[in-house]
Amino acid sequence: MKKLVVGIDIGGTHTVFGLVNQEGECLVQDSLYTKDFKEFESFIQALSKGIKKLTLKGEEKFNLLGIGIGAPNANHSNCTIQNASNLQWEGVLPLGEMMEKELGLPVKVTNDANAAALAEMYYGGAKGMKNFIVLTLGTGLGSGIVINNQVLYGHSGFAGEMGHMIVRPEGRHCGCGRYGCLETYVSATGIKRTISKLFAKYCYESELRNIPFNRMSAKQIANAAYGGDQIAIEAFEFTGKILGIALANVIAVNNPEAIFLAGGLAKAGDLILKPSRYHMEENMLPIYRGKTSLHLTSVKGNSGILGSAAMLWKQIE
């Protein structure tokens, strides 16, 4: 009987979950549309039902050892989600307690970006590195920071909220209630907001003008840019500049060996990587130049699922 753990990646738009073995292979997975659930309790019930269905697929029986979950604003120390600006549920949500009650398995919870950092550490480009950062560029922007081979949690469990560094005082309104946060510029949502501003600024023809804001995706913007769409190209240049400057500031504090970009927006590849790398190097203190590399993630599969699972396998080992 195979020993497996459940890895769950809760995102502002989609929640993906799967069964993962000790080698980091996700054998089977499924997903939910997070925004379909107005009540957190109904979301937990649907998620639990989906996990049970996964265990029935195929003829082989599974021995599930536990559940690892990555989620926005998740607190590693008490297994809760606390006031997540990119989720529709407010307040402190007893995620771990509710999942354990539904499935009768031990549960470990961490921030979704910390899960991505663990995936990079065990299964990706950060193998052997002791100091690195992973940014998840999705609905929002998350960051997992590893220092001396340990994920940084901080005093109250919330270290690493780079997405809520204020990069433009009095800038764009953020879901956290403040203005000018990094994720309002550098995320799938942020680049869509940039596109809207560029529509007003320029008269260039663009295929994106025919797509409603709430139906536009980072993938569509990337495809348009690769096709020569000037609006889309400008949006990535602007996004990369904001990100590169922010990374130069972070490097001055953490001095990481490498930074990895993951998530939907990172799938745009060189469109986001090249301008970010250029502006990162241009704005760094001379003592740091050329000493921190910037890469796209090399994790194969969903880093949130694999990292959440790795967190549990590490504890079991």
Image (cartoon, grey):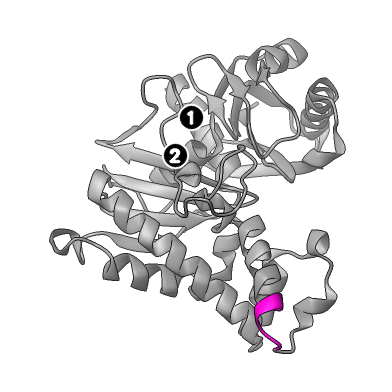
- Quote the CA–CA distance across marks 1 and 2: 7 Å
Above or below residue 120? Residue 192 is below
**Residue placed at 85% from the left, 24% from the top?**
42
Whether residue 255 can be seen here? no
Judged left or right of residue 42, residue 15 is left
The residue to which callout 2 is attached is 118
Q: Of residues 307 and 75, which is closer to you in this image? A: 75
Q: Nearer the viewer, residue 57 or 156?
A: 156
* Corner quadrant of residue 91: top right
Along the line of sight, which residue is nearer the eye, 145 or 125? 145
* Whole-percent x, y for residue 138 in the image: 61, 52
Label 1: which residue? 311
Q: Is residue 308 left or right of residue 13?
A: left
Q: Would you call the spot at circle 1 few (<14 residues within 10 Å), some (14-19), or many (20 or more)?
A: many
Residue 296 in the image: state x and y as whole percent: 46, 62
Question: Which image quarter holds the N terminus?
Answer: top right
With respect to residue 118, does 190 lie above or below? below
Q: Quadrant of the C terminus?
A: top left
Q: Position of residue 245 (x, y in %)?
A: 37, 61
**Is the C-beta separation of discs 1 and 2 under 8 Å?**
yes
Which percent across, then down, holds residue 14?
74, 45
Residue span colored magenta: 199-203
The residue located at (50%, 51%) in the rendering is 182
- Give SS at disc 2: helix
